[in-house]
Amino acid sequence: MTDTPLHLGRASTLPQRPEDAVLDYVPNPRPGKPYLVRFTAPEFTSLCPVTGQPDFAHLVIDYAPGATIVESKALKLFLGSFRNHAGFHEDCTVGIGERLFTEMQPIWLRIGGYWYPRGGIPIDVFWQSGEPPAGLWLPPQDVPGYRGRG
């Protein structure tokens, strides 16, 4: 964490790879208060590592902050960097959750990756850091399973 966010209020370019993305974390404005932060990315994209074709997902990231929170513009740029990343759905979803959990050190984090079908099969991937804290209001992610046209 730096005292001054790298991206907030500045022009920023989209990183070419997730490893090149710098995530900014700022102090939690409500430390010691149990609350949930939710980010949704309904148009997340990455590349299939076999065919190079685009894969699309609706991501939902929930976390209970510790000492810091992730700055949303930096998160947007990080997620956008996956547009050029060739990775399986499991790699992308779990990798995003693990990186956020490792760097931000929230009390708890979960990510749901609701992937659109490839080859006729939708793949949903879920990861969480452990049991949610007692008393934390945990709303459902409410992303319906893929139903096709019908």
Image (cartoon, grey):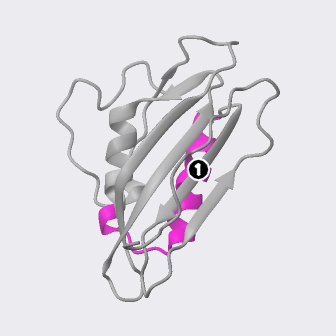
Q: Which residues are magenta?
A: 83-105
Residue, disc 1: 111
The residue at the point 69 percent across, 19 percent down is 34
Indicate left or right for 136 with 45 as reference: right
Q: Is 89 drawn above or below residue 18 in the view shown? A: below
The residue at the point 32 percent across, 83 percent down is 52
- Which quadrant would residue 105 be assigned to in this image? top right
Q: Is residue 95 magenta?
A: yes
Viewer-closest of 86 and 148? 148
Horizontal and vertical percent for residue 65? 62, 26
Horizontal and vertical percent for residue 126? 63, 58
Q: Is 19 drawn above or below residue 28 in the view shown? A: below
Neighbor class of circle 1 (other Cα within 10 Å; few <14, some 14-19, many 20+) is many
Q: Is residue 142 magenta?
A: no
Indicate left or right for 147 with 9 as reference: right
The quadrant of the picture occupied by the C terminus is bottom left
By secondary structure, the bulk of the magenta-drawn segment is best described as: helix
The residue at the point 50 percent across, 61 percent down is 114
User: Can you name the residue that lies furthest to the front here?
Assistant: 150
Looking at numbered disc 1 in the image, what kind of residue is underneath it?
Ile
Q: Is 53 drawn above or below residue 93 in the view shown? A: below
Indicate left or right for 105 with 17 as reference: right
- Which quadrant would residue 7 be assigned to in this image? top left
Horizontal and vertical percent for residue 107? 71, 31
